[in-house]
Amino acid sequence: MLDERQIEMFRERLLHQQQELLVLKQTGEDAVKTVELDQTSVGRLSRMDALQGQAMSRERERRRHIELQKIAAALRRIEQGDYGYCARCGEEIAVKRLELDPAVALCIACASQSDASDRT
């Protein structure tokens, strides 16, 4: 079971990660803007590079959004006193697992079951 000091440490890490992702989100917004289609100002290959860069930026933004949601959910679990317990089975999540990803919501057994069902 996690003690108050450990929970506070994880809360601080989550808040730090959240802040970093929000800063990245602000700087990445220009990269997903509409690509100029005027071929007189941008060559065809350059435009294709710009479109590919835009698609990659959109995917990074999607992943940042998912990670921000996971962090917000973990912070809610801390506030509700449920942090460190699996959202599916209610068992404790190993401290080592939380150290790797403090936003994780599932114990290793439930996460493994989810991964196995995702592959089928």
Image (tube, grey):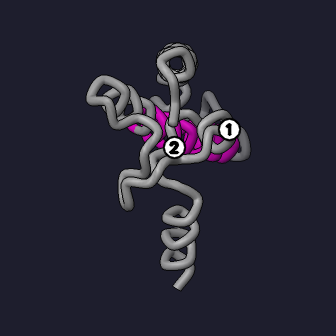
Looking at the image, residue 75 sits to the left or right of residue 18; the answer is: left
Residue at disc 2, secondary structure = loop
Residue type pointed to by label 1? Leu
Residue at disc 1, secondary structure = helix
Above/below status of 20 relative to 94: above
Above/below status of 116 relative to 3: below
Which numbered marker is on residue 104? 2
Residue extending furthest toward the bottom: 120
Q: Main secondary structure of the magenta part?
A: helix
Looking at the image, residue 44 sits to the left or right of residue 67; the answer is: right
Q: Are marks 1 and 2 in contact (CB under 8 Å)?
A: yes
Asked if the stretch drawn in magenta spans residue 39, the answer is no
Q: Residue at x 56, y 77 (%)?
A: 116
Q: Can residue 68 be seen in the rendering of this structure? A: yes
Q: Where does the image place residue 42, in percent across and percent down from the top left?
A: 64, 33
Q: Residue at x 51, y 36 (%)?
A: 1
Q: Residue 81 is drawn in which quadrant? A: top left
Q: Can residue 34 be seen in the rendering of this structure? A: no
**Label 2 CA crowd tier, 10 Å (few <14, some 14–19, many 20+):** many
